[in-house]
Image (cartoon, helix red, strand yellow):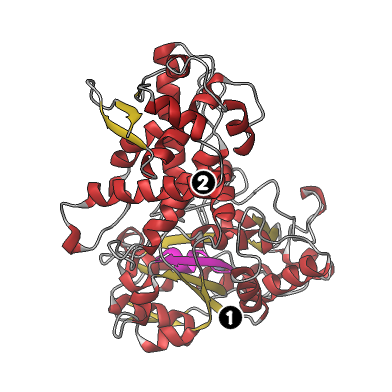
Amino acid sequence: MDEGEGEASADSDKTAALRPARRAPYARNPVTLAGMASDPSAPAAVASTANSGDRPSTIGALRASGYAERTVKQELRENLLAGLSEGRSMFPSIVGYDESVIPALERGILAGHDIVFLGERGQAKTRLIRHLVNLLDEEVPAIAGCELGDHPFRPICARCRSLVAEEGDSAALEWIPRDRRYAEKLATPDTSVGDLIGDVDPIRVAEGHYLSDELTIHYGLIPRTNRGIVAINELPDLPERIQVALFNILEERDVQIRGYQIRLPLDLLLVATANPEDYTHRGRIVSPLKDRFGTQVRTHYPETLGDEISIMDQEARASTGGRPVRVPAFMKEILAALTAELRRSPQVNHRSGVSVRYSIGNLETVIASAMRRAAIAGEPEAVPRVVDLPAVLAGSQGRVEFDAIEEGREEEILSRTSRQAVLEVFRRRLSGFDFAPIVSRFDEGLEVETSDTTPASEFLRQFGEAPGLGRLLGRLGVEEESPGVAASALEFALEGLHLSRRLNKEGADRAGAVRYGGV
Ligand SMILES: [Zn+2]
């Protein structure tokens, strides 16, 4: 998951070979998507230009090939329509948005609009935007060496206009892969016009260019992404002055840099993200810029626990460490239910929300906790248990923003909410289950101790013969014969019984250890 990235370094090595050495168009773009956008499951949306040998290498050859001239928005629209009519999934790996967000986004693209995504954090906004790259042609021709990736038939920069005037149809082309036609920028209050649009380059002035000469300009992110997609994350954080400059270059198509007016009719799809409250807050976005976004796409959190769990499964980093890891379904449900409870909680700051990344991070950490136990105890497999939760939640506390009045009570609120989540899953999974045989053992004096380092075998041993364990595992959908999973299931049941006031629970002698007993 990948919200709110700032600038990653340009991946210049991979693309250097494709460019003439003299200049490096796009090389300074903060983010190139080498690898990232080429999701193997993503559709190739494109009429691809087969292999490099067949591609026209001059303007004349391109013209002779009948290459159609399209704006980036036309290109996106046509490739999307082609994909839709072939029934391809255009946004693979996006869970839970099929009926809501994706149709709205597709309508925005087909309408040729610039698009703003409104949503709380962790709603896959950046991921959706990056998927748009897959709707671009695999490669497009540009005038070789142009910093703005100029279209061969309609160059906009001074260099290429004079180059085409001199060389005509023999002017050389280069082919730009789609991952280099995307740039994203995290808006911050100190973002400058130079970053986004450009500045006078003192070196070029020193080389003898006049200040009034367009060739003295060092172009910023947006001109360098000409003919591509520019994503601005957290648009309301962009200072008003920069918003005005942004609007001017997009709408008026000229830009003023240090007093010089330069005409730059860029061809772009602009996408932005914003928190809905910030976006609607008066004065955070200058009205003409707001007006530029023809389509608003409202994102949302997963609407079901099933969707939340699918995303957790998809995104949690696979653990490596030799031992197999088994995560019982009820453990994932508890984590997903915890996130859902927090999203509903009046004590949590709703402006920032609770990201899906919170669920993913918690899943990764309960797995880590189980791996730690397995390594210490020499267990054959790592299985997360309810006893792992308190430490995990303490470690991810900072990912939830509480309302200011709750200061100092964060830990208490989290642990109460996690108890609610355990109880909710316990009731859903095990309502009506006959616990009498287990509870009566405790009423007769059984005490069971557990901790985040108690191995499964040690935990189970305390029961001797655990009555009804087989039926319990069946109800929980556990099929494998695994002491780790059996211990996890039984511990979940004890905690559920405790939360239903049928068992007592107290801290044991060791820190982090608890003891269950009869009430
Ligand atoms: Zn150019």
Image spot of residue 219 (x, y percent): 42, 65
Q: Nearer the viewer, residue 88 or 392?
A: 392
Q: x, y percentage for residue 140?
A: 69, 62
Above or below: residue 217 compared with residue 334: below
- For the C terminus, the quadrant is top left
The image quarter containing residue 274 is: bottom left
The residue singled out by tag 1 in the image is 113
Residue 333 badge: 2
Q: Which residues are magenta?
A: 218-233
Assess whether residue 56 is covered by the magenta stretch.
no
- What's the residue at 35%, 71% (across, down)? 210
Count neighbours of disc 2 (C-alpha within 10 A) and say few if under 14, some if 14 to 19, many if 20 or more. many
Q: Secondary structure at mark 2?
A: helix
Residue 111, compared with residue 37, is above or below; it is below
Left or right: 241 in relation to 492: left
Query: Callout 1: helix, strand or loop?
Result: loop
Circle 1 packing at 10 Å, graded few (<14), some (14-19), many (20+), is some
Q: Give the residue drawn at x 54%, y 57%.
A: 127
Could you tell whether 294 is left or right of 394 in the image?
A: right
- Name the one closer to the observer, 263 or 410: 410
Say if mark 2 contacts mark 1, CB within 8 Å: no
Query: Quadrant of the rendered structure where residue 234 is?
Result: bottom left
The x and y percentages for residue 152 are: 67, 69
- Name the residue located 18 percent from the left edge and 63 percent from the top edge: 404
Q: Residue at x 31, y 53 (%)?
A: 400
